[in-house]
């Protein structure tokens, strides 16, 4: 396998010597005279290893190392140093350098050190690829279906997959927005680059800016080391912003700038960094209503809504329930060491008559449970959760039946409605929080947060 190595030194003769030595080992060498030139090359080329001198005019070795660790955290750096400054090189290893070589260096020793660093780079890349493949397996690809509404989604994916245009996925919770985002990435021109997912609703507001853009050591209390933000992690790849409608207004302005100008500014660092990311955003909210209510920036909405893809609810694609259920059963059964061949007619009938308020996520969880308890290769109706056979399946109309008084202000009224909704879900799920969260179509963490906010005591729910 051929590798690209960047040599950074202000002495042209040394750069030539290293180039001559390294090219004999199927290595393509790039050279730079200082740290700033090196960063410019790193932005343009796919570099596997940096070999940098310690002392250089302008941006020196330690400064370059710090920048590389922020921008390209998996890229190994070898530091070259004179014998008199070996202790500084050791310190650089503590700061993230892969290794160091002392000047004047032995060619054989150089070959060994470079070979080990490139092997390390290959291992890191292989691990990333395997993690991505495992992630794809764990997030079982639910792009299954032949209904007209879903065929339109597949056609949209095919149209936009190779584009860098910003995509906005809309639809109810559990309709498979992240699955669609991963499919767009996996089948597009950026497939060999990172896919980075961020749940904007799951990160505390005070940490969102650091999470998105990174920060420098000492930027705020608790910032004990440099942090690479999600935008930089996704450089050259895809950044998936889930639940973007829950993003605070203050951060929306900075996200807008990153999308418009393709630059970010880490917290505590005034220097801008260029980024090349394709952004896919997703929300279950009506963003136009949020814009009208001054909860979402209008300019950001139009920046995100370049290529909208609305995802249908599962109840709007009933003909896909059977194929999806069989798909999940096959994959989940294989994971559990079981061979599931299908569903009994009565089980399929129960699933197609249920309205699936939690959509595909709820269906997958239902099939996973059935796969675990099934005693044969065919899933029977007795293997399905009891609530599927309820005379009144969980849906918006049944959730709103509890008595709700009229509080004196809108905020209190909305809180009472939300509390009634959650209590109904808990009753339906017999007090099991995870099941209630699935029924509503939100994460367990979000569900727990709402329980705490609304002062709901689960131990008082009848089981």
Image (cartoon, rainbow, N blue to C red):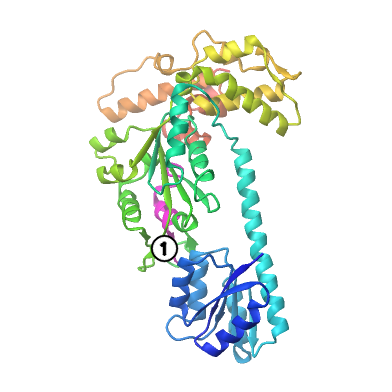
In the displayed structure, 210 sits above or below 36; it is above
Q: How many marks?
A: 1
Mark yes or no: residue 215 visible.
yes
Q: Position of residue 79 (x, y in %)?
A: 59, 79
Can you see residue 226? Answer: no
Who's the residue at 68% across and 27% down the image? 330
Seen in the image, is 227 located left or right of residue 17? left
- The stretch in magenta equals 199-216
Q: Which residue is mark 1?
A: 220
Q: Is residue 455 left or right of residue 340?
A: left
Is 415 within the magenta?
Answer: no
| Residue at x 49% of width, y 57% of height | 233
Compared to residue 7, the image places residue 400 above or below, namely: above
Q: Position of residue 8 (x, y in %)?
A: 52, 80
Q: Residue at x 33, y 27 (%)?
A: 414
Quadrant for the C terminus in the image: top right
Q: Quadrant of the N terminus?
A: bottom right
Residue 348 image offset from top left, x and y in percent = 61, 14
- Give the SS element for disc 1: loop
> Is residue 298 left or right of 2 when viewed as pictured?
left
The answer to which quarter of the image holds residue 92 is bottom right
């Amino acid at each position: 396998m051929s590798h690209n190595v960047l040599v950074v030194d202000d002495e042209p003769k040394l750069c030539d010597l290293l180039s001559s030595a390294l090219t004999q080992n199927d290595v393509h060498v790039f050279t730079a005279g200082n740290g700033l030139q090196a960063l410019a090359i790193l932005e343009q080329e796919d570099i596997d290893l940096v070999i940098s001198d310690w002392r250089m005019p302008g941006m020196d070795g330690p400064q370059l190392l710090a920048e590389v660790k922020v921008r390209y955290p998996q890229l190994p750096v070898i530091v070259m140093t004179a014998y008199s400054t070996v202790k500084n090189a050791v310190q650089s290893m503590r700061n993230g350098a892969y290794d160091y070589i002392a000047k004047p260096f032995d060619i054989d020793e150089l070959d060994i050190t470079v070979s080990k660093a490139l092997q390390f780079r290959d291992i890191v890349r292989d691990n990333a690829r395997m993690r991505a493949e495992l992630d794809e397996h764990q997030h079982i690809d639910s792009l299954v279906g032949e209904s007209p509404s879903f065929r339109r989604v597949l056609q949209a994916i095919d149209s936009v997959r190779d584009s860098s245009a910003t995509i906005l996925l809309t639809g109810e919770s559990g309709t498979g927005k992240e699955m669609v985002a991963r499919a767009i990435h996996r089948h597009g021109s950026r497939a060999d680059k990172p896919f980075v997912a961020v749940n904007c609703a799951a990160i505390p507001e005070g940490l969102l800016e650091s999470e998105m853009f990174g920060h420098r050591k000492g930027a705020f209390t608790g910032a004990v080391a440099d942090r690479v933000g999600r935008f930089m992690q996704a450089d050259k790849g895809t950044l998936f912003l889930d639940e973007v409608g829950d993003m605070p207004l203050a951060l929306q302005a900075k996200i807008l700038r990153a999308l418009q100008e393709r630059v970010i500014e880490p917290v505590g660092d005034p220097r801008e960094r260029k980024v090349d990311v394709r952004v896919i955003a997703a929300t279950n909210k009506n963003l136009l209503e949020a814009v009208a209510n001054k909860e979402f920036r209008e300019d950001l909405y139009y920046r995100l809504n370049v290529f909208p893809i609305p995802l249908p609810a599962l109840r709007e694609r009933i003909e896909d329930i059977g194929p999806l259920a069989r798909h999940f059963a096959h994959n989940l059964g294989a994971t559990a060491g079981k061979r599931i061949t299908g569903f009994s007619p009565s089980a399929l009938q129960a699933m197609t008559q249920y309205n699936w308020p939690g959509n595909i996520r709820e269906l997958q969880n239902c099939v996973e449970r059935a796969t675990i308890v099934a005693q044969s290769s065919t899933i029977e109706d007795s293997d399905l959760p009891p609530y599927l056979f309820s005379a009144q399946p969980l849906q918006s109309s049944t959730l709103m039946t509890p008595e709700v008084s009229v509080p004196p202000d809108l905020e209190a009224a909305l809180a009472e409605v939300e509390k009634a909704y959650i209590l109904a879900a808990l009753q339906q799920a017999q007090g099991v929080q995870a099941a209630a969260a699935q029924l509503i179509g939100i994460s367990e963490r979000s569900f727990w947060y709402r329980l705490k906010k609304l002062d709901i005591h689960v131990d008082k729910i009848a089981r």
